[in-house]
Image (spheres, rainbow, N blue to C red):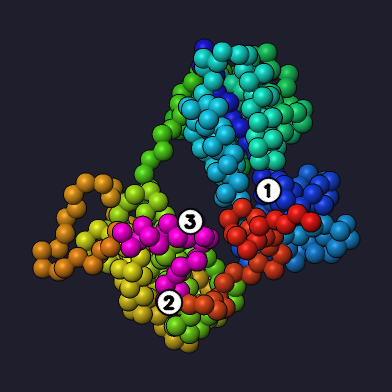
Amino acid sequence: MTLFALADCNNFYVSCERVFDPRLQGRAVVVLSNNDGCVVARSNEAKALGIKMGVPLFQVKPLLRRHNVAVLSSNYSLYGDMSRRVMEILGQACPEREIYSIDEAFLRLDNLPVEAESFSLDLRAQVLKATGIPISIGLGATKTLAKLANHIAKRVIQGPVYWIRSPQAESALFDQLPVNDVWGIGRRWAQRLESGLGISTVEQLRCASPRLIRSHLSVIGERIVRELNGQACLDLESVQPNQQIICSRSFGCRIHELPLLEQALSNHAARACEKLRRQQLLANAVQVFLHTGLHDARPYSNALALPLPSPSADSRQIIRLARWLLRRIYRPGHAYQKTGIILLGLGSAQGPQQADLFLPSRESPRLMQLLDGINQKIGSNSLFFAAQGTQRPWQMRMAQRSPRYTTCWKELPQVA
């Protein structure tokens, strides 16, 4: 029998913060987006106060002060490392795994030597013991049912594990759930189903004709209906190599000067090259973009791309080309909000490469390997290029960021 599980970390960003700061346990906590602009994560206590996802910080500041809500900036280094640890444990317990997002993974549990619910409870205990991150697990014969079961576990029964053993036996519960609780049914499709077919609950969608739903929502809608009835149409997806790598962040303040823009872009290029080498890929082309705020009095945006002389993952070559492209699109007199780089035409670094017949190669894989090894061993940015600058006034605002407990030697947690 086919059986899928969806393991989902509970309030992931908040849970990561609570692992290293027990004072946040039981307290309302929110985590902010880039430049501390909007709320992107909330504890259950913060949700109970009516704080909505995505609400701008300035709109809820009085509410946050009134209820003594802990406000934290996003700590992506910490969240990424904690996600890696959770996914490693899930992968060791169940090799058939699809990482769906930073805090979610699908698992195949077809041939377990033990009962699936018992296995899920044990797996949850392992993750909690090893990382401190609580997870919920939904079980079902299809990925759609597993996703729905996970939603029921977290939002309806508020328990660690829920198993939809038979969709037909769940009709009373499904009839209480709005149709947009189903994975793949967004707000627009939910409106279309209700206005066109009078379908507003999960049970009504499950009982609908797959062909009828296909005529309204395409073949994807038909698959959702079949999956809700226990017919698996989607299997685990293998990890596909990236087609492009993008690195970009909004500035913490508006930037006017070209040298500061070049510093910021050089940092993005260095990060993009690290990702490129980690995945054993080479880039064939580089694109750079630059823009002001959308609502500025004199908005400006531009982008320019150029192929590399030969496929490369060398930070020096890519930073040099990126800065050259930036100078071509920069226009003085504007207050810029963002710049970034896109590495295009990615291909495997394994095997022979097509070089330029008339230009000597400037690639140095051993130098890049040494650079990555030192930064991995001692800490990120222990070695960096002069083009990246040292002061970096353009960095994002992160006034309430917690320490990077697991990825920075200087910010390791201390035990008194």
Query: Magenta stretch containing residue 377, yes or no?
Result: yes
Nearer to the camera, 224 or 46: 46
Residue farthest toward the left in the current orientation of the protein: 357
Secondary structure found at label 2: helix
| 370 to the left or right of 135 | left
Q: Nearer the viewer, mark 2 or mark 1?
A: 2
Question: Quick check: 270 above or below 186?
Answer: below
Question: Quick check: 153 above or below 79?
Answer: above
Alpha carbon distance from label 2 to label 3: 19 Å
| Badge 1: residue crowd in 10 Å (few <14, some 14–19, many ≥20) | many
The answer to the question of whether label 1 and label 3 lie on touching residues, with beta carbons closer than 8 A, is no
Considering the image in quadrants, where does the C terminus appear? bottom right
Secondary structure found at label 3: helix
Q: Nearer the viewer, mark 1 or mark 3?
A: 3
Question: Quick check: 254 above or below 80?
Answer: below
Q: Nearer the viewer, mark 2 or mark 3?
A: 3
* Residue topped by disc 1: 16
| Badge 3: residue crowd in 10 Å (few <14, some 14–19, many ≥20) | some
| 8 to the left or right of 294 | right
- Pick whichever of labels 2 and 1 is earlier in the sequence: 1
Residue farthest toward the right in the current orientation of the protein: 66
Residue drawn at x 53%, y 73% is 337
* Residue topped by disc 3: 376
* Residue topped by disc 2: 386
Whether residue 378 can be seen here: yes
Under mark 1, the amino acid is: Cys
Nearer to the camera, 41 or 380: 380
Quadrant of the image occupied by residue 170 = top right
Residue farthest toward the bottom in the current orientation of the protein: 333
Residue drawn at x 37%, y 54% is 277
